[in-house]
Amino acid sequence: MYKFVIDMMGSDNGPKGLIKAIDEFSKIHQDIFFYLVGKVDEFDVFKDRENFKLIQADDVISMDDNPIASLKRNESSMIKAIKTYKEEKADCIISAGSTGAYLTAATFLVGRIKGIKRPGLVTPFPTMIKNKSVVLLDIGANNLNTVEELVQFAFMGRVYTKYVLGIENPKSYLLSNGTEDHKGTNLIQDTNKKLREIKFENFVGNIEGRHVLDGEADLVITDGFSGNLFLKTCEGVFGIVSKLLKQGFKKNLKTKMGYLLSHSVIDNIKETFNYKKVGAAMLLGIDGYVIKAHGNSDFEGFTGALNVSLSSVKNQINTKIKEELNISDESR
């Protein structure tokens, strides 16, 4: 039986969306035991349920709290959840709380995989090809990175793409402001050179942000600052386009008739670029399965987070990363 630990208090929307997602997920996956951590009276619907243990935590770490100082807040739902994860030797932990606090706590309390310089947040992201995702790494765990760290991201991302998405030989790229090898910051130029020197398998080269979602790339490597900017910009654009479409079609009778004629096309676009279906990123490089759910997780988003968690655990991503790193060491 798998053991999942969940910080119930991290989401901007509170536990409500999480409760529904966990309820539905637990009915489908009856081989999972859940440890739910937080203000128990807000999710006591699970108190008499089999395969559930509710753990009280009175404190909640906010997005504005200092990550290092948060380590001392032992009664917070996040820190108590991480300690429960370790004590119960659980299979994974999920939180929608502060990324900085979560990364810091996971690094100090769970620890990195031996040899990994820095963990990175990885997530699949929808492309224009329906049901085809591109994996992005790092999307916000770091503000500054080195060449060595980006090369490690490439190896870890390749493993994730291969075993989670089932792409045997993923096409890998570096996010840059031009496709030529000499384009980009010094970091991108030097990383490009290093990946070519070590003959990183199926490394194509640089890719511009406008082509990331074309569906050609399987894996895109970036520093955490640029990756987070790209991710949030895409989410913002998707939201704006959706609002503009709604406003446009509600304008008058003609536009409403237009929607009736084209709604299947519009619905297909919305479904194709529905990033909430993924709902989570995994902290690759941490010696455990530490999953970061979206800060505004709702039912759909947290269901995606639960699915990502189960897939990562079942595919034993960390074991395969350790194997890959041994190969990478020999290839340098």
Image (cartoon, rainbow, N blue to C red):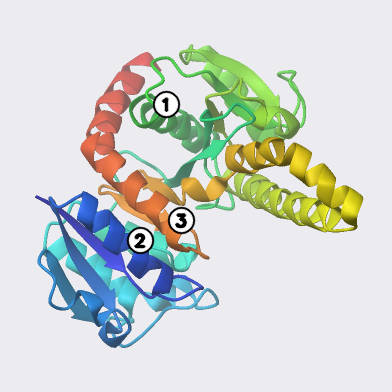
SS of the residue at dot 1?
helix
Separation of residues labelled 1 and 3 (CA atoms): 27 Å
At x 70%, y 54%, the residue is 239
Q: What residue type is disc 3 on?
A: Glu
Label 1–label 3 contact, CB within 8 A: no
Mark 2 crowdedness (10 Å alpha carbons): few <14, some 14-19, many ≥20: many
The quadrant holding residue 319 is: top left
Q: From the viewer's perspective, is residue 323 above or below residue 300? A: above
Q: Which residue was labeled with disc 1?
A: 158
Q: What residue type is disc 1 on?
A: Arg
Q: Is residue 1 left or right of residue 208?
A: left
Separation of residues labelled 2 and 1 (CA atoms): 29 Å
Q: Is residue 136 left or right of residue 46?
A: right
Q: Nearer the viewer, residue 152 or 229?
A: 229
The quadrant holding residue 125 is: top right
Q: From the viewer's perspective, is residue 224 above or below residue 180? A: below
Mark 3 vs 2, N-terminal side: 2
Label number found at residue 300: 3
- Closest to the camera, between mark 2 and mark 1, is 2
**Position of residue 50 measured from the top left corner of the image (x, y, whole percent):** 10, 67
Label 2–label 1 contact, CB within 8 A: no
Q: Is residue 60 left or right of residue 137?
A: left
Q: What residue type is disc 2 on?
A: Ala
Label number found at residue 21: 2
Q: From the viewer's perspective, is residue 246 above or below residue 278? A: below
At x 61%, y 50%, the residue is 228
Q: How many marks?
A: 3
**Position of residue 204 measured from the top left corner of the image (x, y, whole percent):** 59, 15
Label 3–label 2 contact, CB within 8 A: yes
Q: Nearer the viewer, residue 101 or 242?
A: 242
Residue 80 visible in the snapshot: no
